[in-house]
Image (spheres, grey):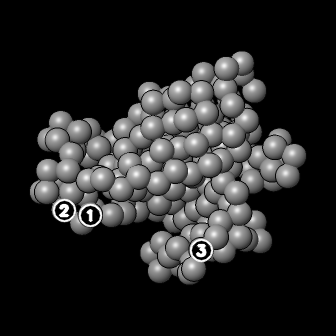
Amino acid sequence: MSEGRADRVRIHYRRPPDRIRIYEQSVALSRDDVIVTISDPLTMSEPLLVDGRPGLEEGSRAVWFTFPGVWHDIGRFHLADGTLTGIYANVLTPPRIERADWYTTDLWLDVWVRPGAAPTLLDVDEFEEGVAARHIDTETAERAREEARSILERASVGAWPPPVVAEWTLERTLAEIGA
């Protein structure tokens, strides 16, 4: 790990207008261009369904890729048995990273890529409702749309996600943190 970065981080995740959740994760890799973290095994009352199929469930883990200055992060979602369910991009404001505390705002739009399937844009209705309610400004809304479009275009031609996402599997990430 790089000097000045923590072994565990707290991600202060704001969902407009005023919901804040704090997620704690272990850091597996910290470089200037990417930080790889992993969730603890998730506690869930019911599975998170994406396109009607489980994306995460009780005991699942997600490997997260945060790119400083970038308007999305990426998660590798797995079932409790380690099966990869898909790659998830969360459109958000570039995180403000202050050693062990990170701050970002969710902009609702998400891109989901199930192995062997075409990319899908998620949560468009929530995004449009948030924009209509003025929970984010016009400029930020347009930047979120551009980010989602760019991810979809690159994913549809195999140019997204970046190679680091394939390199940092669940197994490699768990080994790196000693789990």
Is residue 1 at least partly visible in the picture?
yes
- Residue at 25% over, 58% down: 127
Q: Amino acid at mark 2?
A: Glu
Residue 44 numbered tag = 3
x and y percentages locating residue 32 in the rendered image: 60, 22
- Residue at 57% over, 80% down: 45
* Element at label 1: helix
x and y percentages locating residue 62 in the rendered image: 64, 57
- Mark 1 and mark 3 lie on one chain; the one further toward the N terminus is 3
Residue contact between numbered discs 1 and 3, judged by CB atoms under 8 Å? no
* Element at label 2: helix
Residue contact between numbered discs 1 and 2, judged by CB atoms under 8 Å? yes
Q: Which residue is mark 2?
A: 129
Q: Is residue 7 left or right of residue 77?
A: right
Figure label count: 3
x and y percentages locating residue 120 in the rendered image: 40, 62
Instruction: Estimate the spatial distance between the alpha carbons at disc 3 and disc 2, rounded to whole Å.
Output: 26 Å
- Circle 2 Cα neighbour tier, 10 Å, few/some/many (<14 / 14–19 / ≥20): few
Mark 3 or mark 2, whichever is nearer to me: 3
Instruction: Estimate the spatial distance between the alpha carbons at disc 1 and disc 2, rounded to whole Å.
Output: 5 Å
x and y percentages locating residue 153 in the rendered image: 38, 46
Q: Which residue is mark 1?
A: 126
Q: Amino acid at mark 3?
A: Met
* Element at label 3: loop
Residue 164 numbered tag = none
- In the depicted structure, whether residue 43 falls above or below residue 129: below
- Residue at 48% over, 72% down: 50
Of residues 104 and 169, the one nearer the viewer is 104
Is residue 115 at least partly visible in the picture?
no
Query: From this viewpoint, which residue is outermost toward the top?
Result: 3
